[in-house]
Amino acid sequence: MEDTNVEKSEVVEQGVSGALRSGIFEVGHAPHELVPAADGPAPIEGRLRKAPLRVPENYEECSGFTLFGRRIRTLLYSTDVAAIRNSNADAIFAVYPFTAQPAITQALLTVAEAPLFVGVGGGTTTGRRAAELAAVSEMQGAAGVVLNSPATPEMVAQVASTVDIPVIATITRFDNEAAEKIQAGARVINVAAGRRTPEVIAKLRAAFPALPIIATGGRDDETAAATVAAGANALIWAPPSVVELQRDMMVRYREKAEAAAEAAGEGAPVATVVPDITDMPVADVPNGVVESVSPEVEEAEQIGEEDFVSPYRGRLPILPFFGRKRP
């Protein structure tokens, strides 16, 4: 029995070492050797499916905030289902400049693999309808609802008392109304103050040290770093549009095709000239096959309106009229 166990252990070790030698694992450590934690496991990607829309690396420096046990550091600002499906962001920030509709929320939730924060109003949509949209979004599976900056503290309180998921209130400056929105039940604050975003975040952080704050990362790394230094817990990233990505892809495809043709010694493609059928000569037809008619005879044989005689004149049937007696 002991010999059998020894043989099995040898087979297992040989299999593991063979796997290491065959290149299945990138880290070439010997069996039973401790792998340093810095190496970490190899990332898992598909042969075809990957995450081409990767948030900037400096966004990962955010401290993040915890939502239902999940750490949120980066948010993708998009409502494009293709972009949402192919992003590695921790959450989705789905706010759009139209009236909130549950059908749009359901479509985004169908493709999203990360928590979805969806807009429910604040500007055009207010009051009870915004609260009902928030309730529907929660039932559909949204992780949070976003209210735009015009939303009043009373509206924040109404939505917060309706749903159990967090309410994200957007502010453009730190004033008494912003503080009232937090006291009314806003669990997360989205700062959208443009160039003054770091300044507003610093004031907000000084007044509410434990409040989760999110904001856009700006156009460059310096702006993102300043926003994080001011106290933002998570950054919102606006990805390039699908049109831009497709255009860049086609440029690469054309350059690759031209390079391959040049390497193969092929010249410039010659366009095939398609003859115009209107300029083609008339085919030679033997005499007697087609009877030609001179223009004079053809014009003389034309029938005018005054020469037309209906074959049914004087012989049209008399249709009976139902309900009437014939005279």
Image (spheres, helix red, strand yellow):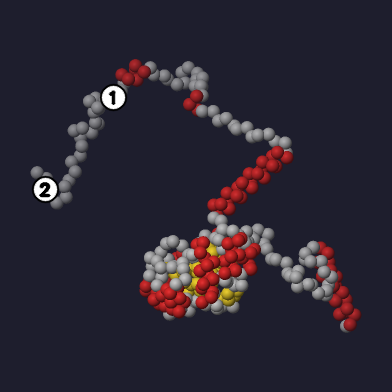
Q: Residue furthest left?
A: 327
In the image, taking residue 267 as reference, residue 228 lies left or right, namely: left
Depth check, front residue: 322 or 308: 308
The reply to whether residue 138 is in sight is no
The image quarter in which residue 91 lies: bottom right
CB-based contact (under 8 Å), mark 1 and mark 2: no
Instruction: Tell me where residue 211 appears, x and y as whole percent.
Output: 53, 76
Instruction: Tell me where residue 226 appears, x and y as whole percent.
Output: 59, 65
| Residue under the image location 64 percent in, 61 percent down | 50
Distance of mark 1 from mark 2, alpha carbons?
A: 41 Å
Within-10-Å neighbours for mark 2: few <14, some 14–19, many 20+: few
In the image, taking residue 186 as reference, residue 52 lies left or right, namely: right
Within-10-Å neighbours for mark 1: few <14, some 14–19, many 20+: few
Name the secondary structure under disc 1.
Answer: loop
Depth check, front residue: 37 or 29: 37
- Residue type at the position of mark 1: Ile
What number is the disc on residue 325? 2
- Residue type at the position of mark 2: Lys
Where 51 sits versus 246, above or below?
below
Q: Quadrant of the N terminus?
A: bottom right
Q: In which quarter of the image is the C terminus?
A: top left
Instruction: Tell me where residue 52 appears, x and y as whole percent.
Output: 62, 59
- Residue indicated by mark 1: 303
The image quarter in which residue 42 lies: bottom right
Instruction: Tell me where residue 8 appears, x and y as whole percent.
Output: 85, 76
Where 41 sits versus 276, above or below?
below
| Residue under the image location 73 percent in, 69 percent down | 41
